[in-house]
Each structure stands twice: as C-alpha cells, then as structure tokens.
Amino acid sequence: MNDGTAMKAEVFLTPVAPPATLGLFGFFASTMVVSTWLLGWWGSPTGSPPTMFEIAAMFGGVAQFAAGLWSFKARDYIGSALLTMWGGYWMAWGLLELLAALKVVKIPPLDVAQPGFAVWFIPLALFTSWGAIAALRENLPLFLVLATVGSGSAFVCAGFWAGSPTWIKVGAWLFVFGACFAWYTGAMVLLEYAWGRVVLPLGVIPGLMKLPASANRPGTVLSNPMEYLAGQPGARRAT
Amino acid sequence: MAMYRPEARIMLQPIAAPSVLGNFALGSALIIYGSWFAGGWGTEQDVSSFFPFLLFFGGLGQLAAALWAYRARGAATAAFHGSWAAFWLGMSLMFLLVTTHSITTPARGDAWQSLGQWMIYMAVVSLTTAFAALAHSGPTFLTQATLAVGAAIAAAGLLAPSMSAQHVAGWFFVAAGTLAFFAGASLMLGAVSGKVGEPVQFAHGDPGVKVGQ
C-alpha cells in the first residue's frame, strides 16, 4: 500500500568466488581426453569409450553445469550461458555413451554418417560463436577458447554429417587448442583472485576490451575486495 | 524523466569454511582407494563394495563443499574440490557399471589408457589449484601438490604400464588423503577454539546470526 511516503530501493551486492575456473577446467580435461582419443593419440576406437565417458559426463558435464549456474550469481552473461550449455552437452554425450555401454544403442565408427549426432553441433557452433563475439569485450584468452571451440564444432558437425574422419579430426585439433586456452583462462582467473594481483597476463587489447592494458602486466592489482579479515569465509576471501 | 538510481551496499555473508567437509570427504576417498590401488589390501572384486562410499564421500560430499565454496569466496577450494568431486562421481559410475557387468576395467598393474589420460589432466588441474592455494594455506597447498604428484605418477603407471609406479601413486594418494585430514582438522579446530579470527555474531541469536547451533 502506498501511503504517500517516498519509497527507496537498495541494491545488495554479494561477492562470490569466480565460478568460471571449475567450469573451464572441466571443459579443458574432458575436451583433451576425448579430442586426443578422436585424433588417435591413444586408445582404440571401440575399447576406450566405455571407461572414458563417466568422468567426462561428471567433470565436463555436472561440474561445468554447476559452475555455469553459479555464474548467474557472479553476474557473468557469458559464463552463465556457455558453461551451462557445454555442461549440458557433456552430460548428454555421457548419457549416449552410457546407453551404448548398456548395449541399448549402437554408435557407428567415424567413417559412417551420423546425422542424428551431427546436428548436436549446429547450436553448439552457433551459441559458442556468439559467445566469442561477446568475449571480444572481455579478454583475448576467453575469445580464443570460444573462437576455436565454435569453429571446431562446425567442422565436427560437417564430419559426423558426412561420415568424414578428416573433418572430424580438423575439429578435434581445434578442440585441443580450445582446451589449452580454457586451462589458461581458468588458471588466469583463479590465480589473479587467489594472489590478489595479476599472475598470468589477462590478454587485454586496449580500447577494445573493458580492462586496462596494465592487466597484461604480472603484479598489477586489479581488484579491491571488501573483506572483514578477522571474520569467517564469506566475510573475507577463503582459500 | 530522470532515471532513479538506487543505493548499493555490499553485503558480506559469513559461513562455515566448506574446505573442512571438502578435505575430509576427499581424504576419506583417497585413503580407501589409494591403499587399494597401491595393492595394500583386497581383490579386484572389492570395487563393488567400496564404490558407493567413493560416490557419496569423494563425489557428493566434495561437490557440496565445492558449491558452498563459491559463497565462502574460496576460488581454489571450489576449483580443486569440484574437479575431484567430478572425478570420484565418474569413477563411481564406472565401478557401478563394472558391478552390473555392463563393462570391464583392467586389473591393477595392467595398462589402462583412459584412466591414465584422465590422471594427466587431474594432475595439471591440481597443480594449478595448489599454486593458487599457496597464497593462503600451507597445509592446503601440500595436500593439493601431493595429490598432483600422485596423479602424475599414476598416469605414468597406467599408460606404461608399471605396477610399481601404480603402487607408488597409490601411496601418494594415501599421503594426500592424510594431509587433507590434517588441513580439514586444523581449520575446524582453529575455528571452534575461537583462536582464529573474531567472527561477527550476536551470541543469543539463532544459528547463522551466532556462530554454531
């Protein structure tokens, strides 16, 4: 009921630890394991998946999905959308491989067209590429993650659609690069937060991205966290 | 019309340190799996008996700790325990499939390429979080660094394969688990003794307003 007095609103801001690191580490590890297997660096085409998919579904899937959900709290548009959706991908792939392990479905070899799986990579390529454009305002490592993974998704899509191992391997190479950039980006965010200053250069292009050029110099202090140092975790940063 | 701009405040919300649960849950899983992996006890069939424990302690327990760590503003805790929670959840699902005879896994000492690959990246992730933890806590750094070394040795032992390397890795897991218990216990005892910090509280309030229940 409005009794005529002026109403005031206050915005309460609550700090949280950066969720992106766990999501990017989950993406890094899962993408490296599966992409290097696709490239034939290790394992066998049919023997490896039954003992490979479980951790991918949990680390790339559940953990990355949870990090994506926490990214809403961090007010991170790119993380909340993309980590959550890539987490969804790894859980979906895990479910497919689980059904294969239970002999409910049969997954054909790479040289046989799989349009039902290829179409997964159409939305993945699209939203990841949009994320790459958005990341041009953030930092270069994140842009490189999303640009390589977005383009890799397009090649993998074409490869599974046509039953072309060559195109799949081009996509897998791009995924390997994307995974390495993901590790760097996750470590960059984590170490800057934990040490309170830049440890790994943040890869800022001055004028294009929001952070100052000094973010590229190790030792630069970028953040000024509000903390009650004698308090419990949450009132201050924890390990 | 001029836009109304509300006032903003930063609200800090203290919670109990989630790394106590994270370290105890991780330590529990590491000591059981590590000593078995090192050949210290049991047979290949024993995974069917202990995987539910790994699922709920190393997996679910650590995942809960990792997700609360965001609220506690613990970046290294969230990344480290979240990563290892996912690892144990995945391993538990694998052992569940072994138990239901849906898949088979290699015996201890044999080559196991996929697990060896996973161990490489668990080592990389753990080493990264250990370097971050070094900024705040010696015991946490030691726990994570020891686990990283154990995972690297396990990767070599599983890919080569080498039974002796696998055994060494298993004992490294046990050592990391023991350190995790120490790190968790030192945090918990420091907090309940009241000798660490001076938390904001109203002693006669409800739980949350005061420290404890």
Image (cartoon, grey):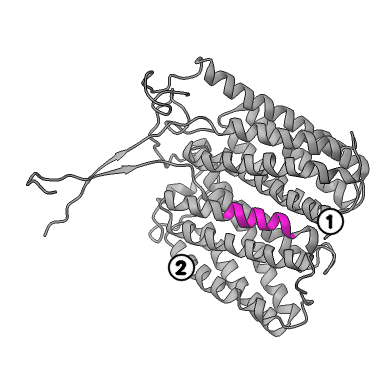
Assign the magenta stretch its main secondary structure. helix
Q: Is residue B68 above or below residue A180?
A: above
Q: Nearer the viewer, residue A61 or A19?
A: A61
Q: Which residues are magenta?
A: A53-64
Q: Nearer the viewer, residue B108 or A127?
A: B108
Tell me: A220 left or right of B137. Answer: left
Question: Is any atom of residue A101 visible in this view?
Answer: yes
**What kind of element bears circle 1?**
helix
Q: To which quarter of the image does residue B23 belong?
A: top right
Direction from residue A119 to residue B35 in the image, left or right? right
Q: Is residue A199 visible?
A: no
Q: Amino acid under label 1?
A: Gln
Q: Position of residue A141 (x, y in %)?
A: 54, 57
Residue of label 1:
B113
Q: Is A142 colored magenta in this rendering?
A: no
- For residue B37, the mark is none
In the rendered image, residue A42, in percent from the top left (x then y), is placed at 82, 62
Secondary structure state at the residue bearing disc 2: helix
The kind of residue on which mark 2 rests is Ile
Tell me the mark number nearer the camera, choosing from 1 and 2. Answer: 1
Residue at figure coordinates x 68%, y 30% from the top left: B180
Q: Position of residue A128 (x, y in %)?
A: 52, 68
In front of the other: B193 or A235? B193
Q: Which residue is mark 2?
A: A133
Identify the residue shown where x is 46% and y is 60%: A78
Residue that appears at 43% across and 31% down: B14
Query: Does residue B168 lie above or below A216 as drawn?
Result: above
Mark 2 Cα shell of 10 Å, populated few (<14), some (14-19), many (≥20): some
Q: Is residue A123 above or below residue B43?
A: below
